[in-house]
Image (cartoon, rainbow, N blue to C red):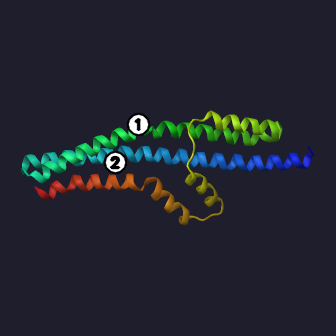
Amino acid sequence: MTSHDAQMELQTLDKNLWETSGARFNAAERLARQSALSLYAGAALSLAATMLGAATMLRPSAALTLAAMLASAAALAFSLIEASASHGVKSERLHACALRLRALMREAPALGAEAAAARYAEIVAACPDNHLPMDWALVHARKQQHGWKTEVPYALAAYGWRAALVAAGLVGAAVPLWWV
């Protein structure tokens, strides 16, 4: 292998390291935010169930009772599903993997293309979690400075329905105040 070929392999590896680590950093941030939003959504749904239940004591109504039961069931089901997703744990693992990949970016020229490529494969294989295609796409969009054209759809896809549940829970908690 000529020195030119080795240099080209190192450049390709550096690009792969940058893209993969960037996507994993994005995934770690996305999962950490999803974990926080899930907590807020579960709390908001629980608050709605509590307020609806309290409203049924002040003004008995079959509709309020049903709404309180549905909100309680939704809060329980949502909390169990989100807890089992382990967003926080996955976020930490992906962040650690991204840090190891960035460290390898600095070490790669001294290691050489073949050894660095083998180490890259080891690091990626050692992480049981992977980023989503949208995390990878965000890396490229940020590099090309597409700004809000990419950030907004990414945020809606990553956080939208959890944020909607937070809002729904808060609205559900406020409704009994008007009802009573």
Residue at image point 84% right, 50% down? 8
Q: Which residue is mark 1?
A: 84
Q: In which image quadrant can residue 76 be found? A: top left
Residue at image point 39% right, 41% down? 82
The amino acid type of the residue labelled 1 equals Ser
Q: Is residue 75 left or right of residue 16?
A: left
Residue at image point 70% right, 46% down? 17
Whether the residues at callouts 1 and 2 have beta carbons within 8 Å, the answer is no
> How many numbered markers are drawn?
2
Q: Is residue 95 left or right of residue 14?
A: left
Q: Nearer the viewer, mark 1 or mark 2?
A: 1
Q: Which residue is mark 2?
A: 41
Q: Nearer the viewer, residue 58 or 117?
A: 117
Instruction: Please tell me how crowded label 2 is: few (under 14), some (14-19), or many (20+) other residues with Cα within 10 Å.
Output: many
- Tell me the CA gap for discs 1 and 2: 15 Å
Residue at image point 63% right, 33% down? 126
Q: In which image quadrant can residue 127 be found? A: top right
Q: Is residue 148 left or right of residue 45?
A: right
The amino acid type of the residue labelled 2 equals Ala
Q: Nearer the viewer, residue 126 or 101?
A: 126
Q: Nearer the viewer, residue 174 or 149?
A: 149
